[in-house]
Image (tube, rainbow, N blue to C red):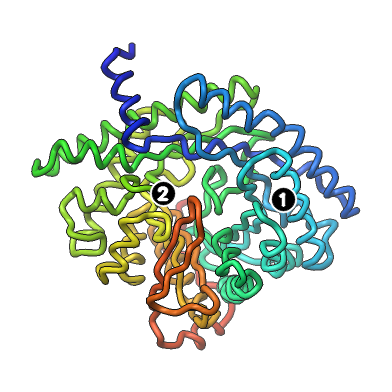
């Protein structure tokens, strides 16, 4: 039973501590939309999305109004388009036309993003997957709501370095083609190692081939709630600290479970997972970096940061898995620079560097996220940064990702303004030394020895 104290406590979390359901994401399989005729394929895609998702946004608004729980985003994820468009698409322009179809469907449904302009190439690339990857700059520069993700490696298969090299070039070209908007296209493009099939968060969401025809995933976020809870135990030992985080994560996840079950029932779509992630926003008091400071650091990036983040991530997951039988996606703490005011402050103060962020990704939920770098950074350098991050995921059997933005025309010390949830970011310096010979070797980095579990 829920008592009146818990009701009041939840209201407090929502009203004053930035607790929200960050997203309801409807995953839709498009495997039955394949067709050798491109126009037929696009019509099938448009019709299926607009049929399945026609009530998604209104249902989210109804739940938000009736339960008083903010639901910030309503989104759609689809089967990786490289699989859906492979039979019909013969050029990068063909694939980009499917992106426009996705964009039109997203706008008609009223969702803020649609994810799944994706390919899974951790071991090798089919001709269709290579075409889709080459089409990304055009696709993201001619659409507004389409998000793209590419899985380049996994613990089981190793890292596809040919694809890593290509994606460095694709990111640079995407930055060039969207330079009038401060290279915003790169904010909608992420590369992964060990990408999950059920992630509801953009830009990395796609509907994996292991999923049902249509499912509802919910992503919950509450950095402000955790920080407020920790303020009440300031100075206590680690046991008390961990218990407080765990109990708070449990309460936050229960809110997501309620929304997910209700959305599933009303839409008559199976419930997939709850992604319990401390995903920050630019709003004051909604920062993962502020939690780290509350644990005892002057700035995120100070000595002890990686240990504090590891503790936070682990306790969040322990609390979450007790609150829902189906916790999935990424789940844990996100550390996007542009979307977290505390992270931005730490970069400006000189406390947080790209190398320290990479160390932190060893123990958080995602990776190098929403990091702005100088626009003249070489494509091979971007590929090297990607390879480093994917290696962390491959060896540690965890998801890691890179969403990096070379802002054309800007350099270290300048600030780029993305707006909305994407926030703003200082341009961070990048190691100037070359990795060209490493990136240009080609081939595949083999899977680590502990990948052989059969």
- For mark 1, does the 10 Å Cα neighbourhood hold few (<14), some (14 to 19), or many (20 or more) residues? many
Residue 198 x/y as whole percent: 55, 42
Q: Residue at horizontal 55%, vertical 79%?
A: 379
Q: Residue at horizontal 56%, vertical 72%?
A: 164
Work out whether residue 67 or residue 319 is closer to the camera in this orientation and state it: 67
Work out whether residue 193 or residue 144 is closer to the camera in this orientation and state it: 144
Residue under numbered circle 1? 103
**CA–CA distance in space, label 2 to label 1:** 24 Å
Residue 317 x/y as whole percent: 34, 40
Q: Quadrant of residue 30?
A: top right
Q: Residue at horizontal 60%, vertical 60%?
A: 150
Compared to 349, does 294 lie above or below? Answer: above
Q: What element carries label 1?
A: helix
Say which label, 2 or 1, has the lower sequence index: 1
Work out whether residue 195 or residue 55 is closer to the camera in this orientation and state it: 55
Indicate left or right for 79 with 90 as reference. Answer: left
Residue under numbered circle 2? 281
Residue 101 x/y as whole percent: 78, 50
Indicate left or right for 88 with 200 as reference. Answer: right
Q: Quadrant of residue 95?
A: bottom right
Indicate left or right for 217 with 106 as reference. Answer: left
- For mark 2, does the 10 Å Cα neighbourhood hold few (<14), some (14 to 19), or many (20 or more) residues? many
């Amino acid at each position: 039973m829920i008592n009146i104290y818990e009701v009041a406590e939840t209201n407090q979390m929502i009203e004053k501590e930035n607790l929200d359901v960050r997203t309801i994401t409807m995953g839709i399989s498009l495997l039955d939309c394949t067709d050798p005729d491109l126009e037929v394929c696009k019509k099938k895609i448009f019709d299926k999305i607009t049929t399945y998702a026609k009530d998604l946004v209104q249902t989210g608004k109804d739940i938000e109004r009736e339960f008083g729980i903010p639901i910030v985003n309503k989104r759609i994820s689809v089967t990786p388009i490289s699989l859906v468009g492979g039979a019909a698409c013969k050029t990068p322009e063909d694939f980009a036309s499917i992106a426009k179809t996705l964009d039109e469907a997203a706008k008609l449904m009223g969702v803020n993003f649609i994810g799944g302009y994706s390919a899974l190439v951790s071991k090798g690339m089919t001709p269709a997957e290579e075409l889709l990857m080459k089409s990304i700059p055009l696709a993201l520069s001619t659409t507004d709501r389409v998000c793209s993700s590419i899985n380049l490696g996994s613990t089981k298969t190793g890292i596809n370095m040919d694809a890593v090299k290509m994606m460095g070039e694709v990111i640079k070209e995407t930055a060039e083609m969207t330079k009038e908007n401060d290279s915003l296209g790169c904010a909608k493009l992420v590369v992964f190692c060990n990408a999950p099939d059920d992630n509801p968060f953009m830009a990395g969401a796609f509907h994996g081939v292991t999923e049902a025809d249509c499912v509802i995933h919910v992503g919950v976020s509450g950095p402000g709630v955790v920080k407020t809870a920790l303020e009440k135990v300031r100075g206590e030992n680690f046991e008390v600290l961990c218990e407080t985080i765990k109990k708070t994560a449990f309460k936050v996840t229960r809110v997501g479970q309620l929304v997910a079950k209700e959305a599933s029932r009303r839409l008559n779509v199976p419930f997939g997972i709850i992604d319990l992630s401390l995903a920050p926003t630019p709003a004051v008091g909604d920062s993962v970096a502020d939690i780290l400071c509350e644990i005892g650091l002057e700035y995120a990036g100070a000595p002890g940061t990686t240990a504090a983040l590891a503790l936070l991530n682990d306790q969040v997951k322990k609390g979450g898995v007790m609150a829902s039988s189906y916790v999935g996606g990424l789940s844990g703490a996100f550390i996007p620079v542009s979307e977290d005011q505390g992270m931005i402050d730490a970069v400006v103060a000189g406390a947080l560097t790209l190398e320290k962020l990479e160390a932190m990704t060893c123990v958080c939920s995602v990776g190098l996220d929403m990091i702005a770098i100088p626009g003249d950074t070489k494509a091979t350098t971007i590929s090297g940064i990607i390879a480093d991050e994917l290696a962390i995921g491959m060896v540690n059997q965890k998801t890691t990702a890179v969403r990096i933005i070379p802002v054309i025309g800007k350099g270290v010390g300048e600030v780029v303004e993305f707006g909305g949830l994407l926030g703003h970011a200082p341009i961070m310096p990048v190691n100037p030394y070359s990795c060209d010979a490493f990136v240009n070797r080609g081939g595949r980095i083999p899977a680590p020895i502990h990948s052989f579990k059969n």
